[in-house]
Every structure is written in C-alpha cells, then in structure tokens.
Amino acid sequence: MTEYQHLLNQSREWLLEAAYPDPCYLAIRDLYAHSTSTEDLTQARQAAHKTGAIAQILEHMNPEGWWEKPGPGYGPKYRSTVWAMTLLAQLGASLEMDSRLDTACAYVLDHAFARGGYFTSSGAPSGTFDCLQGNLTYALLAIGCRDPRLQQAVDWMSRSQTGEGVAPVTDKKASVRYYNYKCGPDFRCAANGGLPCAWGATKVMMAFSQVPAEWGTELVERAIARGVELFFSVDPVTANWPCDHHINRDWWKFGFPLFYITDLLQVADSLTALGYTTDARMSSLIELILHKQISPGRWALEYAYKGKTWGSFGEIGKENKWVTIRALRVLKRINDAG
C-alpha cells in the first residue's frame, strides 16, 4: 500500500459521515468511487442536492437564474451570480439533479457572455479577464453545461493565451483584440501591472481540465502548454511568479471555497487534472501538501469567506473536510498514475 493510499484509507470513515451530505458526496465521487457502490454514490448525490449546501444556495436563486441582482452577476462579492455558480461547481452541483442549475447556466451565458467568447464582468468584451473567464468556464463545464457558446469561451481562453489572431489593446478597430484588463498573451493582466498573473492562470488551467475531449484542439493544447511553462518557470512552492508587488501570502493558505484568490493546492489540482502527475517538477508541491497535514489524512482550513458568501464551510485552523478532499484528490491522481 502506498503512502497516498494509506492517507485515503485513514480519512475514509470521517469523510463519508452521512450527517454531512455535501463532503460525503464529493468524497465518494472523487476519492472512493472505486470502492463504493453505485447506489451509495446516487444516494449521496441526491442528499447533497436536496438537503446540503447546494440546495441552500439554489433556494436563494431568483427563478430567472440570478443571485442578489440581475445582470452580469460579478457584484456584489461574494454572493452574486458569478460567485454562486463558482461555489456550486466546487460543491459538485450537477444540472442533471436540479433543473434550476440549467436555468442558472443559461442566465450566465445570456448576461455575462459577450460575442467572441468573452465572459465579462460588465456585459461588454472590455470586462473580460482571466480569473473570471477561467472561473465561469470551469463552473459551467463542471456543472454539466454543454451549450455551444462554451466552445467559443474555450477558444477565446486558448487564443488569448497564445496570442494567435488577437490584436493588441491599441488596435481598437480589430474584431478580436486584447482589452484594458486582459491586456496580452501568457495570462497577462493589468491588475498585475501587465505581467502574467498566476492567479488567473490557475483558474484558466482549472477550466482547461474540464474541457470535453471532443472539444480539444491543438490550440487548446498550446494554451495549456503556456500555463505549464508559467507554473514551472520557478519552483512552484515558492510562488515566485511575476508580480508587480509583494508575493501574496494566501498562496500558502489552503482554503475553501476559492474565488479569484487561489492557493498552491489549486495549482497542484489543475496540473494533476491535466495529467502532470509524475512530473518531477511537482515534487516540492507534493511535499508541501503532505507537510501541511494536521493529522494523518486531514488538513486544516486556512482561508475562508465566512459571512461573505453562501454557507459556512468550517473554522479557520480546524480540520476541514473540504480542504482534505482537495488535498486527497491531488494525491489520489498521483497514486493512480503509479
């Protein structure tokens, strides 16, 4: 038995407590599906959608498909439509289980999506930036939406990283160009002084991990390669990626949920989901994840949005099922890769 398999076994009983339907469902789906009956998975999935946080968030949705106020849904943080959908995806919500999710996906695409494939905070292409593009593309794909407009989102998300066919910010007559925030290729963002933004790159790479195989193209592969190149341009555990100010300490705080701020665990999640499970450059990240256990097979919550978003997902500094599932998901992929 490998060390990783031992940790999975150590956590199993705790994570599968039926009194906590949301993490129970996610743990079965992502960690223990091979050793759990289909009936148990189905029951856990139903319980999470009927009585858990997923159900509670959907109760607050307007029948038209938005949260807090109509429109693109970027504000107010972190309870409006963008954040509700991002959270629902991280909880494992599936539109197969609740038709309201189909309504919400359609609303996002009708109100936060601009022609050309841009997810936008304003409704116009100028409101696009990588962390929003990545979060919403990931969320809708993870929830199960396959609207053809998402293929446009994937194409723009890819093209905007490689720069293929995209005019500079200054060419305002071009039909496809960069804008004030999404200002250049290789994850460049004005909020990071025009430098590549590893936060945005992480969200985009998470979205790429959800792209259906039939939507995959050489362009997508080239864009993924740009993200891999950025992540491994330094030892990832240092988080010493381009930055126009100090390195944000939140990189080393494992949290739940994750919105535009991210952590090194999500970097590892994106890379392993894309197949980088045996790459030697991952070793320091894996060592960090193992080191941050507070007991065998359990990790603590170090960053949260308590009181700012829908639901509460644990106390800072305490063992946390959500963070533990995130960590074990990464380790399981490495274990399965052999």
Image (spheres, rainbow, N blue to C red):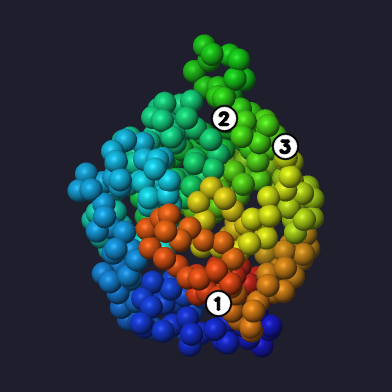
- The amino acid sitting under disc 3 is Asp
Of the residues shown, which amino acid type is indicated by label 1? Glu
State the separation of the CA atoms marked 1 and 3: 34 Å
Locate residue 281 relative to residue 83 in the image: left or right. right
Neighbour tally class for label 2: few under 14, some 14-19, many 20 plus, Cα within 10 Å: some
In the image, residue 300 sits, relative to residue 98, either above or below, namely below
Quadrant of the rendered structure where residue 18 is?
Answer: bottom left
Q: Earlier in the sequence, mark 1 or mark 2?
A: 2
Write down the residue under mark 1. Answer: 319
Q: Position of residue 303 (x, y in %)?
A: 56, 61
Q: Which mark is residue 244?
A: 3
Q: Nearer the viewer, residue 261 or 28?
A: 261
Mark 1 and mark 3 in contact? Answer it, CB < 8 Å.
no
Q: Residue at x 75, y 59 (%)?
A: 237
* Residue situated in front as seen by the camera: 271 or 262: 262
**Amino acid tagged 2:** Tyr
The quadrant in which the C terminus is found is bottom right
Residue 113 visible, this orientation: yes
10 Å crowding of disc 1: few (<14), some (14-19), many (20+): some
Q: Is residue 14 above or below residue 281?
A: below
The CA distance from mark 1 to mark 2 is 37 Å
Residue 181 numbered tag: 2
Q: CA distance from mark 2 to mark 3?
A: 15 Å
Mark 2 or mark 3, earlier in chain: 2
Query: Residue 239: where, in percent of width, then height?
Result: 73, 52
Q: Are marks 2 and 3 in contact (CB under 8 Å)?
A: no
